[in-house]
Amino acid sequence: MKKKISILAVSALASLALSVLPSAAHADAPTCATANFVTSCQGATSDGALYAMSVPANFNGTLVLYSHGYRYPVDIPAGIPLVGGYKVVKVAEPAPSAAVAKYLLGKGFGIAGSGFAVEGWNADSGIKTDTELIATFKAQFPTTTKVVAWGSSLGGFITQGLAEQHPDLISAAAPMCTVAGSVEGELTMAADVLWGMKTFFDPTIKGHNYSAGAAGYGEAMGDLVKVFTVLGKLQAGVASGAWPDSAGPAGTALSAIPSRSALLLVGLMSGLPAQSMHFDATSGPGPKNSASYTSFALAASPALAVLENIANAAVLGVLATYDVEQQAGGAVIDNSKTDYAARIESEAVSNNAALSGNTAIGGMLSFLNPANPAAPRWTADPAAVIKMRALASHTGKINVPTIALANVADPAVPAGNVQWLADRYAEQYAHAKGVAMATFSKTGTYTAVRKSFLAVWSVPPTTYTKFTNTGAPDTSGPAANGTGHCGYTDKQLMAIVDLATNAAATGKLMSGGPLYTVIRKAGGLSIDPEFRAPLLKFYNEQ
């Protein structure tokens, strides 16, 4: 199943890559050159992070600072599916694509971005680097009056962290496809996937508690091979329901249940989206209401959606777990008390047919019971958990006008992250209105509370799965809108940055007709106030 993996926002690196300076122990003055009415500068902040910044001749005084997404902290051997041959890169990334960079410069904005000092989960150092880079940019271009911060994935986390910790430095923020709250929620989702794959399909998958040093690196790379191997076997057995030969005790105990149902259960209990880049989980081949259409839509499509989502999130799941464990010094995931039956209570109803009915659901959950020695739970190292929780996290407080963008069916960083931010802001807004009303009751003066947070959703079509003439699913086309990780069009990215720069200029969010016009022209976006993305399972259990 060869797919373009979309975990890393690296598609723009080739076109945005600049010749870079060697890392420095201290910050030096940038090296600049002017061509085609654009002055471009390169340098390194005091932590050695390489940066790039550009300003057009008609600079309007606003810097648009971009923070890139999670980059793998280690090289990946060539034999690993989908991402084999990846090398650690630290190139500066001043915009999410070359087209967006050109667009911003053409409108008079300055742009800047860092490669950051270290790759992997680097939110703490990333916030510090961005803080210094803002100062460096202002020193080089002293007519700078405003800063808009935006970023993708981990870069969105860094953006929100910057807005919370240093609201005096920025005028507006746009975290996109962002992790929110803390890294623990994402790691919990990844661990649930890996534990489920291990327990049902290959007990030799390690999944957590990776050893230090080279041994742990080898364990993580081995897990990637095992996960992709199992996914290939599951894909081959979707129609027959055959269990992989690596399944072990689960394959024997649950052999009467189609393996696709167990795969779907892993996705549901982890909180993965029910739609993927090529599977809408609602349609099938042939005429609507035909047997082929109905059987595929009810039984195969949901499982294939989970399979594709795991394939697109597996590398991040394994390596982010390995990465944070190395930083924390031990295992950080504990599912010893997780109630997976409670986790899927509502999903078991809506996906009953795809899970093969109540008897099958009961059998699978019984196998996952903590009392079953064939399904051992994981426990964390308390000291490592303390270190993990000491890493940068969010309060969810909105200090500057903020526009958050999420794909509704993001397999790596679910839309529930943005929902968490939206919920925190709803609390903040309600409190501010309460204060305003209390002031009015005392003084007779009411000051309206201005809204400062806007959630924008990239929404998949109702149906989009394609089929060949033989009725087989066709995954050769591009991912559907609203699916994949950070898979936005340039028009959508331009719309978000337009909203953010407008907010920086006016001090408030765009609203009414102008807002709806921007959203409509971008295509595939929604600002439906009634829409609510499901929170990550981690946050639902807090």
Image (cartoon, helix red, strand yellow):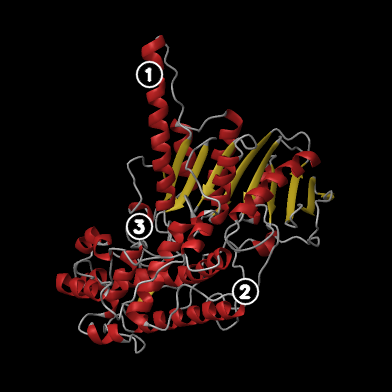
- Give the percent coordinates (x, y) of residue 195: 38, 73
Q: Earlier in the sequence, mark 2 or mark 3?
A: 2
The three-letter amino acid code for the residue at tag 2 is: Tyr
User: For numbered disc 3, what is the local secondary structure?
Assistant: helix
Q: CA distance from mark 2 to mark 3?
A: 31 Å
The three-letter amino acid code for the residue at tag 3 is: Lys
- Give the percent coordinates (x, y) of residue 228: 45, 79
Q: Which residue is nearer to you in this view: 97 or 201?
A: 201
Q: Residues within 10 Å of mark 3 (few under 14, many from 20)?
A: many
On the picture, is 348 further left or further right than 320? Answer: left
Cβ–Cβ under 8 Å for marks 2 and 3:
no
- Vertical order, 473 against 538 (above or below): below
- Vertical order, 416 against 253 (above or below): above
Q: Which residue is nearer to you in this view: 95 or 342?
A: 342
Q: Quadrant of residue 400?
A: top right
Q: Quadrant of residue 236?
A: bottom left
User: For numbered disc 2, what is the local secondary structure?
Assistant: loop
Q: CA distance from mark 3 to mark 1?
A: 36 Å
Instruction: Tell me which residue sits at (73%, 54%) in the image.
Output: 51
Q: CA distance from mark 1 to mark 2?
A: 57 Å
- Give the percent coordinates (x, y) of residue 145: 70, 32
Q: Which mark is residue 537?
A: 3
Of the 4 image quadrants, the one containing the N terminus is bottom left
Q: Earlier in the sequence, mark 3 or mark 1?
A: 1
- Give the percent coordinates (x, y) of residue 482: 43, 56
On the picture, is 258 further left or further right than 39? Answer: left
Q: Residue furthest front?
A: 383
Disc 1: which residue = 438
